[in-house]
Amino acid sequence: KILAEFHQQSLTRVMNPHFMFNALNSVNSYIVNNRTNDATYFVKQIGDLIRQIFNSAYHKEITLEKEAKLLNSYLSLEQRRSNSYFNFIIKVEPDLEQFTIPSIMIQIFAENSIIHGFSDLKIRGALLMIQFKKVGEMVECIILDNGIGRKKANEFKTEKSNKRELHGLKVIEERIKLLNIHNPKQKILFEVIDLQNHLTREAKGTKVILKFPYQRGIKLIGEQEKNL
């Protein structure tokens, strides 16, 4: 029951009112400026994202193929809304496309990179990379940005946005903790690394690493096929 509640909270974060307000405000701006084609395309993007989010919400697990599509839809919206001041890359090893992970888990880290890591608009060439790869007996999800780092980002945050990030990360941490209690032999590992320039010690981004046991995802795929 508690896991279901944290799953719901993760869904609520993706569909947060602030994001939806900004997205719809962008549509309104296109309409006011007679950019009807842009408005139509943007509405379609919003609709596609909402459909993918709700499809994911019905399942505890999601394949990396679908997760990559959902992240691509979300990041494309954010990129368009911000006038393309950042770029992103999503990579999934071909053999891992059907590997499953807990749904509605990766987006919060991408959101933090955009809102906080890239909060200094003087940054040019801002880049977010999300990669899924197999390393030994684990499948690693790496969320890497070249933003201003967590320490400097704190200087730009309001009290409200800071509470929002802490709440979001806590939801993910608690979900992982409960999932590991439920399945102690195949634990999910979680780590956040502050990247620095080796010479100047200045922050040069943030790296988040999530590690999923390979057998865990493969086993779940088999169980899903059996249920079908």
Image (tube, helix red, strand yellow):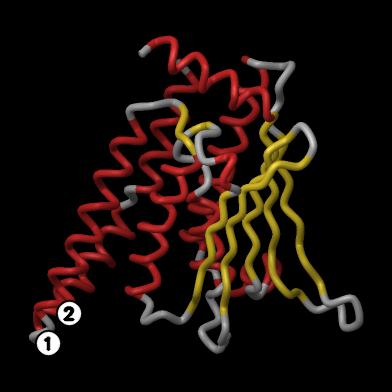
Side of 116 where 74 appears, left or right: left
| Nearer to us in this view, 181 or 170 | 181
Q: Tags 2 and 1 in contact by the CB under 8 Å rule?
A: yes
Disc 1: which residue: 33
Q: Residue 151: image x %, image y %?
A: 71, 68
* Residue 207 placement: quadrant: bottom right
Q: Is residue 190 visible?
A: yes
Q: Residues within 10 Å of mark 1 (few under 14, many from 20)?
A: few
- Residue 124 vertical placement versus 143 (above, below): below
Q: Is residue 180 left or right of residue 101?
A: right
Cα–Cα span, label 2 and label 1: 6 Å
Residue 217 is drawn in which quadrant?
top right
**Residue at horizontal 25 percent and vertical 52 percent from the top:** 48
x and y, in percent, of residue 82 in the image? 38, 77
- Closer-to-camera residue (221/117): 221
Q: Amino acid at mark 2?
A: Ser
Furthest residue in direction right, as rendered: 199
Q: Which mark is residue 29?
A: 2
Label 2: which secondary element: helix
Within-10-Å neighbours for mark 2: few <14, some 14–19, many 20+: some
Query: In the figure, 198 relative to 68: above or below?
Result: below
Query: Would residue 101 be seen by someone viewing this image from the given angle?
Result: no
Which residue occupies 62% across, 31% down? 176
Number of residue marks: 2
